[in-house]
Amino acid sequence: MADVPPGVKGMNDILPPEVSKWQFLEQNARDVLDAFAYRELRTPVLEYTPLFVRSVGEVTDVVEKQMYTFDDRDGRSVSLRPEGTASAVRAYIETARWNAEPVTRWYYVGPMFRHEKAQRGRLRQFHQIGAEVFGAAEPSLDAEMIAMIVMMLERFGLPAGSLDVTVNSLGEPEERAAYRDTLVTYFSAHVDKLDEDSRRRLTTNPLRILDSKNPDVIAVAAGAPNLLDSLGEGSRARFARVRELLTGLGVKHQVEPRLVRGLDYYTGTIFEVKTEAGDLGSQNTIVGGGRYDRLVGSLGGKATPAIGFALGIERILLAMPEAAESFEPAVSVFFAPMDEAALAFAMPIAHSLRADGIRVEIEHRPRNVGAMMKRADKLRARAAVIIGSNEIASGKLTVKDLAHGKQSEVSVADLATKVRQLLD
Ligand code: HAM
């Protein structure tokens, strides 16, 4: 037999039972987002490339090294989205949404694409749940969003104690630019200790040197001037307010002055959440986000403050301790017809239970009852309905309570009620 062509490296199928764990996570996220009055947004996975170049930033790793970019059949450069914020901003601007509502709260769920080195917790097609709020600059919104994220993570079953929430402020773009100059001066004096990547960043994106994973660079970066020290009074007061409100909401967090994030659009508050749960290794950042108050304006929209975040579904699933099987719904009722006539008799009955929302599986290959009961057990069915010629003649079905091994006779008309009793 010929070999099947393999799936693309770093892009996974999500099969049962794993998919049940995904559904649990997505449903809980939606419930929390609903409670905070967010509404869902769905955008295409493909965008014209300049959207990402102008928002995420030309000299970021994501744009420089990781995008799946190609010319479409019309010869236009398109990219698979590496993240969701750029598309949300495009949709916001194209619909001039600021005219429709003063504050827009959107969320999205879906695949993102980055050509990274595939490893545990790092995929080339991964999935995010993200949210963006447009139109509010108040620090209370920053605190509300971070607290919402923590609520969500706890809802997924990650213990609050395993979460590490870090915050920082990049200040106004002018303050960030001034800090950039300070950093260039500092790192230029230590250029001999920088690796090639960091030397390149010295001219393109010096803040990213603070993010280096190279121990030699980390040692130099430890002595670098502190970003928070270079902020003006307004930015400092605003950041203090965010922290105060976070504390009021019971969110434990730490300030990490070296947190810079890898995307260029950020201004003001930025944050990440890491977790100790599971064995994520170095890929343990499960959430990232922050303010981007200038992006809507710089992409051609009305100047609108904004803030958002995205969480990595795959990483969170790895951190959740429960096995995927425990999220799978069991079959409620298994129909076991003993012959073809019993199967024909059973089908409309099963059909009406299903219309009532009861999860039913029918054995379509009638055979001996023992074999069929084994299958019912395997499916973890709550009850089995056994149908043979006697049952057809009497109109009374044999219902077996599989949890207690008890058997009873139930008329067709009473079956739904009986099943509901067993399921309660
Ligand atoms: P990000 O930090 O690039 O931010 O990604 C957010 C999260 O997506 C990460 O914390 C991680 O959990 C997950 N993630 C990223 N890359 C991968 C990968 N290759 N494999 C698995 N998981 C990954 C953003 O994407 C921003 N758009 C967030 C945002 C929204 N900021 C403002 N609004």
Image: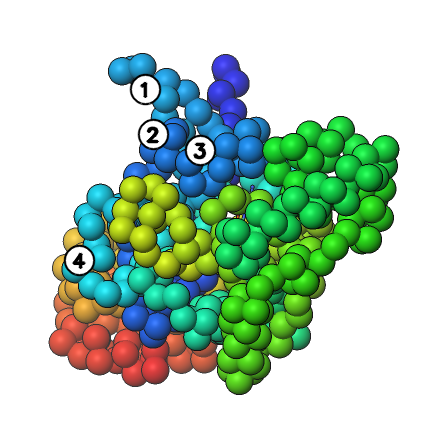
Disc number for residue 170: none
Rendered location of residue 375, percent (x, y): 43, 57
Of the numbered discs in the image, which one, if any, rests on residue 48?
2
Q: Is residue 401 left or right of residue 359?
A: right
Q: Earlier in the sequence, mark 1 or mark 4?
A: 1
* In the image, the residue with mark 4 has its CB under 8 Å from the nearest atom of ligand 1: no
> What residue is pinned by disc 3?
53
Q: Is 332 in front, or is 154?
A: 154
The mark lying in front, picked from 3 and 1, is: 3
The answer to whether mark 2 and mark 3 are in CB contact below 8 A is no
Q: Which mark, residue 76?
A: 1
- Gap between marks 1 and 2 measured at Cα: 7 Å
- The CA distance from mark 3 to mark 1 is 14 Å
Circle 3: is it few (<14), some (14-19), or many (20+) Cα within 10 Å?
some
Q: Nearer the viewer, residue 52 or 420?
A: 52
Q: Specify whether residue 34 is in view.
A: yes
Say whether disc 1 or disc 2 marks the residue closer to the N-terminus: 2
- Circle 3 SS class: helix
Q: Residues within 10 Å of mark 1 (few under 14, many from 20)?
A: few
Q: Amino acid at mark 3?
A: Val
